[in-house]
Amino acid sequence: MSRSKSSENRFSGSHFTTAITTTVGMTLTLLMIGLLLIMAFLGAQWEKQLRQEARVQVFFQRDLDASLLEHARETLRTDSSVEEVHYMDAAKASEELEMELGESFIDFLGYVPLVDVMDIKMKPAWSTTKELSEAVRRMEEIPGIAEVVWQAGLLKQIEDAIQRLLWPLIGLALLFLIAAIALINNTIRLTVYARRFTIKTMQLVGAHPSAIRLPFIKQGLVFGLISGSLAFAAINGILSGMKIQNASLLEVFTPTILAVLWGILLFLGAFLGVISTAIAVNRFLRKRLDTLH
């Protein structure tokens, strides 16, 4: 009786150790995947900010009729490519400049040299060379506009830099992702391997394969959900630590973004846990008893 109880305790202790080891292994792997997702998201935000640095400036014709000027301004403001506009009135700009210089333009030029200008921030989807060229061409056709200036050279440099970095980073991310999936698969397989004789015993007494697989799949699902939550907690801790150093850097990580990240990690943990467990159990179901040693 005592021997049986001791054997049961060793069995429970072994399973507890295996569960801890599996959870830790899956958590570290999902943490690596989560950090890759964080870097990809930050890279996308960085690209968006870089593209929006390529501003468009619209110069209106001098001495333009007030109604025509207002129509041109409204047309620009409501354009599908425009995200934000800042209008600079020539008269006000001239007054400010005259105060700084201490002299009137009209006294020595005979006219105000400045014209009305609108500084335009484009939507990210339109901040490419091709799309922006089309938007600028459309703006130039608006009555009352003298010139549209945009930084084609800067935008081309940004796009070239992104292209040089994009594919190497994608390749590195795929390499890490494959390694992470392989690590989770091996971790789960070792967990199932420790109970291979239990699987074969259930099979020999006539248990249906689905009945054998179900407890292991549930276990893999639980391991995956726990690991996904632990990985998210670790990432949240890392982001909180970084936020103390530089709060503005992490403003993009809103509660919605963090909730989506948590959902992705839970899904990946559950999916990989279930799939890897099912594959490992099927492998031992197909093996003969004399090959299990």
Image (spheres, rainbow, N blue to C red):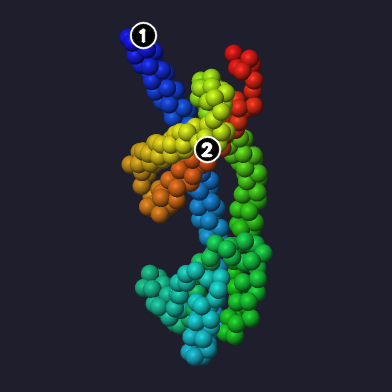
Q: Height in image: 197 above or below 94?
A: above
Give percent across and percent down for residue 174.
62, 39
Q: Residue placed at 57% from the left, 84% from the top?
A: 144
Label number found at residue 3: 1
Sequence-wise, which precedes: disc 2 or disc 1? 1
Give percent across and percent down for residue 224.
46, 37
Q: Amino acid at mark 1?
A: Arg
Quarter of the figure that contains the C terminus = top right
Q: Height in image: 178 above or below 147?
A: above
Instruction: Give the residue pinned by disc 2.
Output: 274
The nearer-to-camera label among 2 and 1 is: 1
The answer to whether residue 131 of the structure is visible from this angle is yes
In the image, taking residue 279 as reference, residue 225 lies left or right, namely left
Give percent across and percent down for residue 266.
45, 43
Quarter of the figure that contains the N terminus = top left
The answer to whether residue 273 of the structure is visible from this angle is no
Alpha-carbon neighbours of circle 2 within 10 Å: few (<14), some, or many (≥20)?
many
Give percent across and percent down for residue 176.
58, 34
Q: Amino acid at mark 2?
A: Val
| Residue furthest top in the image | 3
Q: Identify the secondary structure beneath mark 1.
A: helix
Front in this rendered view, residue 214 or 111 = 214
In the image, taking residue 103 as reference, residue 114 lies left or right, namely right
In the image, taking residue 113 as reference, residue 252 lies left or right, namely left
Q: Residue placed at 63% from the left, 54% from the top?
A: 159
Alpha-carbon neighbours of circle 1 within 10 Å: few (<14), some, or many (≥20)?
few
In the image, taking residue 210 as reference, residue 152 lies left or right, namely right
Q: Identify the secondary structure beneath mark 2.
A: helix
Q: Residue placed at 60% from the left, 31% from the top?
A: 282
Q: How many angstroms separate mark 2 from mark 1 (CA)?
A: 35 Å
Front in this rendered view, residue 43 or 254 = 254
